[in-house]
Image: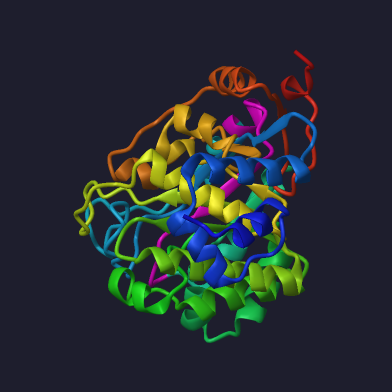
Amino acid sequence: MLDQALKTKVEGHARLNLDEAWQVYAQADFHWLGLQAHQVRLEKHPEPVVTYVIDRNINYSNICVCGCRFCAFFRPPDHPEGYLLSQPDLAAKIDETLALGGTQILMQGGHHPGLPLGYYEDLLRFIKRHAAIHVHAFSPPEIVHFSKLNRLSVGEVIARLKQAGLDSIPGGGAEILVDEVRRKVSPNKCGSDEWLAVMEEAHHQGLRTTATMMFGHQEEPIHRLEHLFKLRDLQDRTGGFTAFIPWSFQPGHTAIQREPEGAVAYLRLLAVSRLVLDNFDNLQASWVTMGPKIAQMALFFGANDFGSTMIEENVVAAAGVRFRLSLDEMYRLIEAAGFRPRQRTMDYRRVSGKASYTG
């Protein structure tokens, strides 16, 4: 049980330190914790609205030299199932996204050992010539990989990608931002300081980014809190993150065998995230990993955003989890929870269209 002084501090929405946040995470009553997170969410977003984005996850390649133990999607170089998406195939995916009312593509891939930075610049220029669409692409580990492979600084890589058409950077590859954990699950991927440095540089260059956490693999619960505080510290310095998205590790077809985190564990972490990340405006529910009903519950545990319609998703699907949700189903879930759906862009500007109706 929490002592009354800490409960009063949480109920007053005061900033928590790491020790206080750990006590709340480990000891707080589940329903009280959800209520506190929901009240913070309503304070930040008093209008009864839940936002979402129409976009598509495009994986330009599954060829990767990282060999992360949690990943069922990658294929090593020369594997018969490895691929590199062609420009005509990419154009077709973008056209379909636009036809469905999409405003952006989320584009990520493996750490391909044979592609120079010019390949990615050409890819971005092709997209911008082909269509007026927001390109949310290349997670921090990819950018660090580009930097090392091309012997350029991270700042130079980001500047060149931005010049070629990059609009924002997704928060993928964060997993848990604690190096003792990363050495176990992704030893060939960038360290936590490198991940954070990419985001800080991107923010300084005027790019907005998101932040994520994949939890429930080989970390300890305290590591999740350390992750949140590293994000909060960076957001204090730059204000460049638009949203935080926690999602649970899916062990199917991976080298890490354990039971996936359940609904209560997910909602508890989401609620604590809402309390700790007081300088983040938006928290996103993860229906892709938790399913639509738990994502609906997340709207009362701190989340104000329902994420993407996910016209296409490959990485979680490779682990055997294939939740699907149409736009009409998303509307029903949001409205049944007592909110109005509103389409948004990556930086949370509202988009007119179906999502502007008042119901």
Query: Front-most of 96 and 206?
Result: 206
Q: Answer whether residue 113 is magenta in the image.
A: yes
Residue 314, quarter of picture = top left
Query: Front-most of 307 and 201?
Result: 307
- Which residue is located at x 21 percent, y 49 percent? 253
- Residue 358 in the image, given as x and y percentages of width and height: 79, 16
- On the rendered structure, is 212 left or right of 63? right
Q: Answer whether residue 224 is magenta in the image.
A: no
- Residue 212 in the image, given as x and y percentages of width and height: 53, 57
Please say if 293 is above or below 148: above
Query: Front-most of 17 and 177?
Result: 17
Q: How did the renderer colour the structure?
A: rainbow
- On the rendered structure, is 59 left or right of 328? left
Residue 121, quarter of picture = bottom right
- Which residue is located at x 60 percent, y 78 percent? 197
- On the rendered structure, is 72 left or right of 336? left
- Residue 184 in the image, given as x and y percentages of width and height: 28, 73
Residue 99, quarter of picture = top right
Residue that lies at the very extreme toward the front in this rendered image: 4
Please say if 292 is above or below 168: above
Please say if 359 is above or below 214: above
Split into 4 quadrants, where in the image is the C terminus? Answer: top right
Please say if 113 is above or below 336: below
Q: Can residue 173 be seen in this view?
A: yes
Q: Give the range drawn in magenta.
A: 96-114
- Which residue is located at x 62 percent, y 26 percent? 100
Q: Is residue 165 visible?
A: no
